[in-house]
Image (spheres, helix red, strand yellow):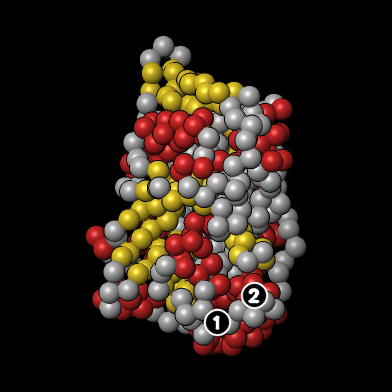
Amino acid sequence: MAVNVIIGTQWGDEAKGKTIDILAEKSDAVVRAQGGNNAGHTVVADGVTYKLNLIPSGILHKGTLCMLGAGMVIDPRVLLSEMEKLTAYGITFENLKIDPRAHLIMPWHIALDNLSEKYKSNSGSSIGTTGRGIGPCYADKYERVGLRIYDIAHPEALKTKATATGELKNRIITEIYGGEPLDIDSIIAEYAALGEKLKPFIDDVSVLADKVIKSGKTLLLEGAQATLLDIDFGTYPYVTSSHPISAGVANGAGVAPNVVDKVYGVAKAYTTRVGEGPFPTELKDDIGDYIREKGQEFGTTTGRPRRTGWFDAVIVRHAVRLNGITDLVIGKLDTLSGIETLKICTSYKKSDGTTLDYFPSVLEELADCTPVYEEFPGFDDDITAARTWEDLPGICQDYILKLQKLCGCKVSMIGVGPDRVQQINI
Ligand code: IMP
């Protein structure tokens, strides 16, 4: 029996999908615990590329119980369209379960996400959200006016709640933002029809996960987004609205934190970020462009080009501490091939000359920091066919050993390409 957690250690898009898929194959059940379709996982299996936003990639393995936990925010239109696309590949959903407590992304959440971003952009303070309604949906959850998965499958509850909330949202949309009002009645009718389709999948994920654990099976808790996007411990306000750290993932799944065995933290061999916000090791030069093109750093969800930069050991140490990471997974090492000199940020230097070896708690302090780099000779070898530690050139081994030492955590997997077989276990 094991309960494993997988989380991102940087700003997301660390190629978690691939590691999740590898671990999901060895798991009896998988729970996605927070976030919504702001996440995008790409999994390449048997030559087919699957792009998943809500459904755990465990769905690709017949017999794996795949659950969407209470901590998620779910857009039912997106969920059903994702199911339709997977159906075309012969995937079936008898093992898909959705917690009735998960919150529903309503059309007004999406409208308000985009209107608020546009409004903020006038003062240069937009966050660069994915525009999927994530923040407004979580805001309603915490204001305790949200609609939940239970409601979509119960037409009377849906009508009462959506009418009350929808009218208020329409006033905000039109009177505050000058936007177009939404047709609440047609939203209710559309959601009721979607609810009919989702009804068979609704079940208590916390109880199901407990059964998996008690029967001695293996459960994987799948985090979306990443540590530096955590609402408390990320680069606030340039963060998402949930807790993508291991404690948040256990909470969102409805699983006690003390049952967790291993916490896998995924990092790229460099760093990327989408959207606005600070990024100390960002490269705005040819090397940054090279990494973007070679690593195909364009968002799975929005297609936006990702910002790229050197590996920042300060942020990954922050992630190791916050998440209790037991195993680091370093992805996309192959992308760095062809760069003459590699750099790793080992600490930050403040303007008063002092050195900081942990991530500052607020952006005002981070603004006073510049990265301190250690340089490494680069490598030209094509390492995409490497399957063992010994297959890696000595320079790559040194780079990984350095990351391991700087981050204070064992590296147990290395990714050398997008396919699930392009992985080295150490
Ligand atoms: P939101 O989650 O759509 O509200 O976006 C808030 C911030 O988190 C933006 O900078 C997004 O680009 C970022 N973000 C949200 N989800 C992901 C993800 O899955 N990967 C990378 N960045 C993300």
- 392 left or right, relative to 29: right
Q: Residue 108 is drawn in which quadrant? A: bottom right
> Residue at coordinates 35% horizontally, 42% vertically from top-left?
410
Label 1 close to label 2 by CB (< 8 Å): yes
- 244 left or right, relative to 337: left
Check the picture and name the quadrant holding the N terminus. Answer: bottom left
> Where is residue 281 shown, x and y percent of the image?
55, 29
> Where is residue 21 shown, x and y percent of the image?
51, 63
Label 2 environment density (alpha carbons within 10 Å; few <14, some 14–19, many ≥20): some
Q: Which residue is mark 1?
A: 93
Marks 1 and 2, how far apart at CA: 9 Å
> Residue at coordinates 49% horizontally, 32% vertically from top-left?
394
Q: Is residue 199 visible?
A: yes
* Near-viewer residue (306 or 239): 306
> Where is residue 95 shown, x and y percent of the image?
48, 81
Q: Earlier in the sequence, mark 1 or mark 2?
A: 2
Secondary structure of the residue carrying numbered label 1: loop
Q: Which residue is mark 2?
A: 86
Q: Amino acid at mark 2?
A: Leu
Q: Is residue 166 shown above or below 312?
A: below
The CB of the residue at mark 1 lies under 8 Å from ligand 1: no
Q: Is residue 33 shown above or below 407?
A: below
